[in-house]
């Protein structure tokens, strides 16, 4: 089914209608299994992203809009960093984040 995108959780069988290539999705049910702090952070980044997006659309000042774009894109980068660093590993390498902390501590990193 090439027009469907599966949930990022390999043991989940839900799929979504594909919106664009290389998209990654977590379904609502799996999202709720994430730690509370991870969910909060995810929602916070998206809220900021959308807030700046709305402001860009409302402003007529080109220079301001440009600066707002930069801020919005920074939140966009935060979202993808958080996705790759927190959300994906939770489903794809669930044993890694747990052991990694103590490993880094041992290495004094
Ligand atoms: Zn799922």
Image (tube, helix red, strand yellow):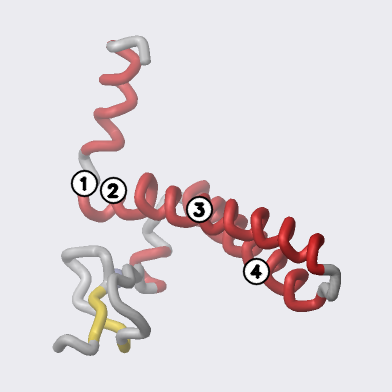
Q: Quadrant of the N terminus?
A: bottom left
In the picture of the structure, the residue carrying the numbered disc 4 is: 50
Q: Nearer the viewer, mark 2 or mark 3?
A: 3
Report whether 1 appears left or right of 58: left
Is the Cβ of the residue at disc 2 closer than 8 Å to that at disc 4?
no
The first of marks 3 and 1 along the sequence is 3
Between marks 1 and 2, how big is the CA–CA gap?
A: 5 Å
Instruction: Note whether 92 is above or below 19 in the view shown.
Output: above
Question: Which residue shows up at 37% across the image and 45% down it?
Answer: 85
Between marks 2 and 3, how big is the CA–CA gap?
A: 17 Å
Is the Cβ of the residue at disc 2 closer than 8 Å to that at disc 3?
no
Q: Nearer the viewer, mark 4 or mark 3?
A: 3
Between marks 3 and 1, how big is the CA–CA gap?
A: 22 Å
The first of marks 4 and 3 along the sequence is 4
The first of marks 2 and 3 along the sequence is 3
Question: Which residue shows up at 43% across the image and 49% down it?
Answer: 81
Q: Which mark is residue 77?
A: 3
Q: Where residue 37 sits in the image (x, y, percent)?
A: 52, 47
Is the Cβ of the residue at disc 4 closer than 8 Å to that at disc 1?
no
Is the Cβ of the residue at disc 1 closer than 8 Å to that at disc 2?
yes
Between marks 2 and 4, how big is the CA–CA gap?
A: 25 Å
Q: Is mark 2 within 8 Å of ligand 1?
A: no
Instruction: Note whether 20 is above or below 40 in the view shown.
Output: below
In the picture of the structure, the residue carrying the numbered disc 1 is: 93
In the picture of the structure, the residue carrying the numbered disc 2 is: 89
């Amino acid at each position: 089914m090439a027009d469907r995108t599966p949930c990022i959780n390999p043991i989940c069988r839900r799929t979504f209608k594909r919106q664009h290539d290389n998209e990654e999705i977590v379904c609502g049910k799996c999202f709720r299994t994430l730690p509370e702090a991870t969910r909060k952070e995810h929602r916070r980044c998206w809220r900021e992203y959308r807030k700046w997006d709305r402001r860009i659309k409302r402003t007529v000042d080109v220079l301001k809009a440009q600066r707002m774009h930069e801020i919005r894109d920074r939140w966009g980068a935060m979202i993808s960093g958080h996705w790759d660093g927190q959300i994906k590993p939770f489903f794809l390498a669930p044993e890694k984040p747990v052991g990694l902390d103590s490993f880094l501590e041992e290495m004094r990193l």
